[in-house]
Image: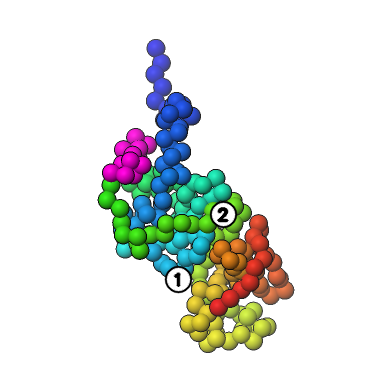
Amino acid sequence: MIFSHAKKSPRDYGAGYRDELERFKTAINLTEYAASQGYQLDKRASSRNSVVMRHPGGDKVVIARGEDQHWIYFSVRDESDNGSIIDFIQNRRRCSLADVRRELRPWIGGAVPRPALELYVPEVVPISRDRAGVIRALAGMKPLVTHRYLEEERAISRELLANPRFAGCVLVDARSNAIFPHADKDGRCGYEIKNQGFTGFAPGGEKGIWIS
C-alpha cells in the first residue's frame, strides 16, 4: 500500500470548503484585519484605490481590492509576498490553511473585537489587474534624491527635487530611470519613465496627471 503525503490544495476539498475560503477573501476587509495585527495607516501614501500600511516591526504593505472583490496585498520589500488575506497570514505566521481558517472564522461571524474606525479604511475602490500591477511597481520604487538626466538635461536641480513639496512625487526604479507617477480621481493609475534619450510609460497603465 502506498501513502501520499502531498499537500492538499483547496481544489481537493468540497464546495463548502472552497466557498468559505472565497468568503474570507471577499468579506473580510484586509485593512481592518491588518490594523488588528498592529499595522498602521500611512494616509499620505494611500489613495482611494490603494492603502499603504506599516508595521512597527518594519513590514510595509500595499492593500487594494480587485475587480473580483478580492482583498489583495503585496509587500514593498519582498516581491514574492503577495496575494489574499490567506497568503497574508500564512506568509507572516508560517501556519497551515487549517490554522488560517480557525483564525478567520470569527471575523465572518462578528465574534472578534474590531479596531477603531480611524485605524483602517472601510471602503477601497476596486482596481483592474493592470492597475494593481502599476501600484505594485510604484510601491517598490524609492524616492528620487538626485538624477543626472534631470539635473543636466532638464535643469531640475537636486535642491528642487529635495523640496518637501515634491516628496514622493518623483521616484527612481531599479534601472535608475526617473519615474513620474500619474494619478486620476481614484488614485495612481500609471507612470512616465524618463532617462537620457528615453521616454516610456508604465505597461498596462493609464495616463492621468502628475501632481506635487
Observer able to see residue 127:
yes
Identify the mark at residue 23; answer none if there is no mark.
Answer: none
**Which quadrant would residue 208 be assigned to in this image?**
bottom right
- Identify residue for label 2: 127
- Identify residue for label 1: 44
- Say whether marks 2 and 1 touch (CB < 8 Å): no
Q: Amino acid at mark 1?
A: Arg
Could you say where residue 152 lies in the image, as x and y percent from the top left? 65, 84
Q: Is residue 133 left or right of residue 101?
A: right
Pick whichever, 58 or 27, lies toward us: 27
| Residue at screen point 45% across, 33% down | 19
Q: Which residues are magenta?
A: 96-111
In the rendered image, the residue lying farthest to the right is 197
Q: Amino acid at mark 2?
A: Ile
Could you say where residue 196 lies in the image, as x and y percent from the top left? 69, 75
Q: Mark 2 or mark 1: which comes first in sequence?
A: 1
Q: Secondary structure at mark 1?
A: loop
Vertical arrangement, residue 201 with respect to residue 85, above or below? below
Could you say where residue 154 lies in the image, as x and y percent from the top left? 66, 83
Magenta stretch, main secondary structure class: helix
| Residue at screen point 35% across, 60% down | 117
| Residue at screen point 48% across, 29% down | 11
Determine if the magenta segment contains residue 98.
yes
Q: Residues within 10 Å of mark 2 (few under 14, many from 20)?
A: many
Q: CA distance from mark 2 to mark 1?
A: 20 Å
Vertical arrangement, residue 147 with respect to residue 82, above or below? below
Q: Secondary structure at mark 2?
A: loop
Determine if the magenta segment contains residue 132.
no
- The quarter in which the C terminus is drawn is bottom right
- The quarter in which the N terminus is drawn is top left
Could you say where residue 34 lies in the image, as x and y percent from the top left? 36, 54
